[in-house]
Image: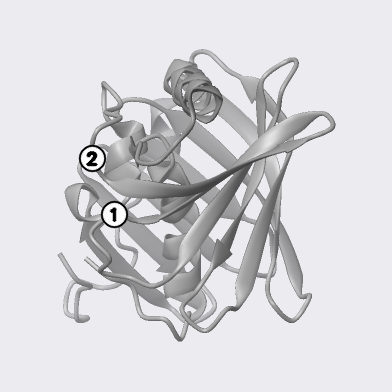
Amino acid sequence: MEFPMDLTRRSLALALCAAPLAGPALAQTALSAADKALVDRAAAYLESLTEARARFVQTDSRGRSVGGEVFLKRPGKARFDYDAPSGLLVVSDGGTVSVQDTRLKTFDKYPLSATPLAVFLAKSIRLDRGVTVTRVARMADGFSITARDGNKRTAGQIMLTFRDRPMELLGWTVTDAQGRQTRIQLQGLQRASGLDSSLFVLKDPRPKNVGRGKV
């Protein structure tokens, strides 16, 4: 499934919440042993985040920023709650990813299996399918992994940034086919336990006679 490159409000929310989570499914081609070791560490770390939460700041290519909070509960569940007045909310309930925009009064649904979220939220993260790592870069206090769609169905790429010691996901940058970048910075990422199951339930608030979103 490909998301439109014009990045409307709803597609931007879904693409940015889903795309970075494809990171663990890295097809390891043309990597040095040291680079492969970093990729393996990153995948193992991400898989260990069975429940987690963080603040995030999303900045688009024009420098416009919006904040929010993300909750993760593997397998299958995630919630990206954008701050007011954005009106955006993205929730995966284990089978469906729902995108609600209260400002535009829209509600869309996508099968979890058709989005990159499925890779990260799977019970076991696979390292032999998905996207292709194009670069592993080291920094003073961490490293980054840049990857693209291994099937070449989309022209964009994603760069995930990690702190090394202790290991922590700091955020990610998505670059689309036109070279436009959107950056997500995580703040205070922490493991959680006992997250309320209601966080991962999002019902269509529209009257039943209103056209439903995609399924």
Residue type at mark 2 is Arg
Q: Which quadrant does the N terminus fall into?
A: bottom left
Q: Residue at x 44, y 41 (%)?
A: 23
**What secondary structure is found at the residue carrying circle 2?**
loop
Seen in the picture, residue 158 relative to 52 is either above or below; the reply is below
Q: CA distance from mark 2 to mark 1?
A: 8 Å
Q: Position of residue 101 (x, y in %)?
A: 47, 71
Q: Is residue 113 left or right of residue 84?
A: left
Q: Position of residue 41 (x, y in %)?
A: 52, 19
Q: Is residue 148 left or right of residue 182?
A: left
Nearer the observer, 96 or 19: 19
Residue under label 1, please give it: 150
Q: Is residue 79 left or right of residue 202?
A: right
Residue sitting farthest toward the right: 140
Q: Residue at x 16, y 79 (%)?
A: 209
Q: Position of residue 88 (x, y in %)?
A: 53, 65
Residue under label 2, please give it: 129
Seen in the picture, residue 45 relative to 112 is either above or below; the reply is above
Nearer the observer, 197 or 10: 10
Of pointers 2 and 1, the one earlier in the residue sequence: 2
**What secondary structure is found at the residue carrying circle 1?**
loop
Disc ID at residue 128: none
Q: Quadrant of residue 213?
A: bottom left
Nearer the observer, 183 or 39: 39
CB under 8 Å between discs 2 and 1: yes
Residue type at mark 1 is Gly
